[in-house]
Image: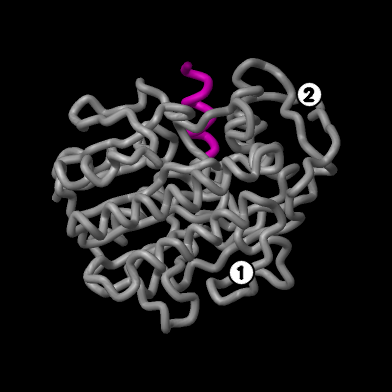
Amino acid sequence: MRVIVTGGAGFIGSNLVHAIIGENAVLVIDDLSTGRPENIHPAAAMRTMDILDGSLSTVFAEFAPEIVVHLAAQSSVSASLVDPARDWAVNVEGTRAVSRAARESGVRLVLSASSAAVYGEPAELPLTESSPVHPANPYGESKLAAEGALAEELAGSPCDYASLRFANVYGPRQDATGEGGVVAAFCSALAEGRAPVIHGDGGQTRDFIFVGDVVSALIAAIYCEVRLGDEAAPGGAAYNISTGSEVSVHALADSLRPVSEFLRPFEYTRERPGDVRRSALDASRAREAFGWHARVPLDTGLAATYRWFASR
């Protein structure tokens, strides 16, 4: 197959490209604002460009992809609070531009990365795709609107589509700087012999999913034989990609002690604005639609992630 991966030099994108490149022709589209050149697989074609670039449709038409996996995004909650207009432009209008280019070039399927952030503070757990959506920050608002943009551009067309609501993804190649993810921040600190810094009291929970499981979900969706973009079904074209397990940030840090051999106390600082208190997502719909479920235990994924940071 011919596959375009936007954001293919980033964390999830580069892991996906490395997994599918052997049997597929892959074009990576990335502006390298957060993606890293060293993440790009040498066998992949590369276009350094913004997804809001007016020539995006031309690039799609020239490559003639069958599949598009749209992972390019503004993914920082704190950045969305500082510059919500930029967050909206990249996440919503960028998704619209990718969807339109895909439709015009005859793409068969578009998979677009969404987020658990669309749900906001939950009334009950675990969250299903039909749970109420009340984003708690501009980032969550833009990811929810991006789902709408995808559907607006592709509903009723021959191009199938789905928004995959990722839980808190972690693993090798994640950026530990800025808001790169709590696991990456903890692993980076521990690899350097520093105490992890926990925001708030550490009692906030997340559904941590290993990047390898996210990649396997994307691949399973690519090869799915049913149409995913059924807007009439409960949850529409959205699918949770998650473990369904609630893990506190403090317990997460404790789980890294054995592999890092770190025994000193952790450090605590004030809670970050825009963070929800609890989160866990039910991925039953993905299992029913394309036969996927998370397989990597948290301890296994954390050990692999820590070793990657320690080897750098």
> Which residue sits furthest bottom?
232
Comparing labels 2 and 1, the label whose residue is closer to the camera = 1
Q: Residue at x 30, y 43 (%)?
A: 5
- Marked residue nearer the N-terminal end (2 or 1): 1
Report the Cα–Cα distance between label 2 and label 1: 35 Å
Prevailing secondary structure class for the magenta stretch in the rendered image = helix
Give the label on residue 51, or none.
none
Q: Position of residue 18 (x, y in %)?
A: 28, 36
Q: Secondary structure at mark 1?
A: loop
Q: Is 202 above or below relative to 135?
A: above
Q: Nearer the viewer, residue 107 or 185?
A: 107
Q: Position of residue 223 (x, y in %)?
A: 23, 61
The amino acid type, in three-letter code, at marker 1 is Leu
The amino acid type, in three-letter code, at marker 2 is Arg
Direction from residue 68 to residue 172 in the image, left or right: right
Is there any visible trace of residue 44 in the rendered image?
yes
Residue 303, magenta (yes or no)? yes
Tell me how many marks there are.
2
Kindly identify which residue carries mark 1.
127
Kindly identify which residue carries mark 2.
264
Give the crowd class for mark 1: few <14, some 14-19, many >=20 residues within 10 Å.
many
Magenta stretch? 302-312
The part of the image, by quadrant, that contains residue 306 is top right
Q: Is 259 above or below relative to 297?
A: above
Give the crowd class for mark 2: few <14, some 14-19, many >=20 residues within 10 Å.
few
Q: Residue at x 37, y 77 (%)?
A: 230
